[in-house]
Image: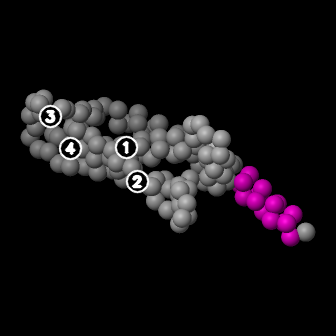
Amino acid sequence: MEAIGQILIFLFLLILGYFSGSYLEKRHYKNIRARERQTHHVPIITFGAKQPIPDAQEAKLFVGSVVVSIDYFKRISATLRLLVGGRVTVYETLLDRGRREALLRMKEDAMAWGANQILNLRLETATIGGHSGDNSLGSIEVIAYGTGVK
């Protein structure tokens, strides 16, 4: 009887994770798309080492950072995918959301300062959490930084 109760709890958490995670992810993507439309007029330009940098009256470093966690359903789904191999698409959406959110935070900060473009964007990622002793992903941090110029 106890085993059936544990299986039911597991299934409940799996279903709850799927529906709540899907809802929250869709809501976050909708918010990201709306904010991307508001910030699309500020270009991000990356230069090579030997290219001239445009003239600017002022320049300032801007950073956008975000930590995004994976939901219970995606964690189970990714664990099953690790058994058979192949693309782990549930992590791809996690990274995509993190990257886009970090870029938006950086751009919004730069726009509030009055920047009309951002130079030499860089992105960094790091995993945070997971269970000690195994390679499971708890959440990711994405940092976007670049130089805003007026």
Q: Does the magenta stretch include residue 73?
A: no
The region drawn magenta spans 2-16
For marks 1 and 3, give the one nearer the viewer.
Answer: 3
CA separation in Å, label 2 and label 1? 18 Å
| Residue 10 visible (yes or no) | yes
**Pointer 4 and pointer 3: residues touching (CB < 8 Å)?**
no
Q: Residue 146 versus residue 36: which sits nearer the camera?
A: 146
User: What amino acid is labelled 1 in the image?
Assistant: Leu
Residue 126 disc label = 2
* Residue under numbered circle 4: 147
Q: Is mark 3 on a helix, strand or loop?
A: loop
| Distance between mark 4 and mark 2 Cα atoms | 22 Å
Between 71 and 31, the one nearer to me in the picture: 71
Look at label 3 and name its amino acid.
Ala
Query: Disc 4 vs disc 1: Cβ atoms closer than 8 Å?
Result: no
**Residue behind mark 1:** 104
Residue at image location 87% in from the left, 63% down from the top: 4
Disc 3 crowd, CA 10 A, few/some/many (<14, 14-19, 20+): few
Q: How many marks?
A: 4
Q: Which of marks 4 and 1 is in front?
A: 4
Amino acid at pointer 2:
Ala
> Given contact means CB atoms under 8 Å apart, are the residues at marks 2 and 3 in contact?
no
Residue indicated by mark 3: 49
Residue at horizontal 11%, vertical 31%? 50
**Alpha carbons under labels 1 and 3: distance apart:** 25 Å
Dot 4 alpha-carbon crowd within 10 angstroms: few under 14, some 14 to 19, many 20 or more: many
Disc nearer the start of the sequence (2/3): 3
Verify CB contact (< 8 Å) between mark 2 and mark 1.
no
Q: Earlier in the sequence, mark 1 or mark 3?
A: 3
User: In the rendered structure, which amino acid carries the disc numbered 4?
Assistant: Thr
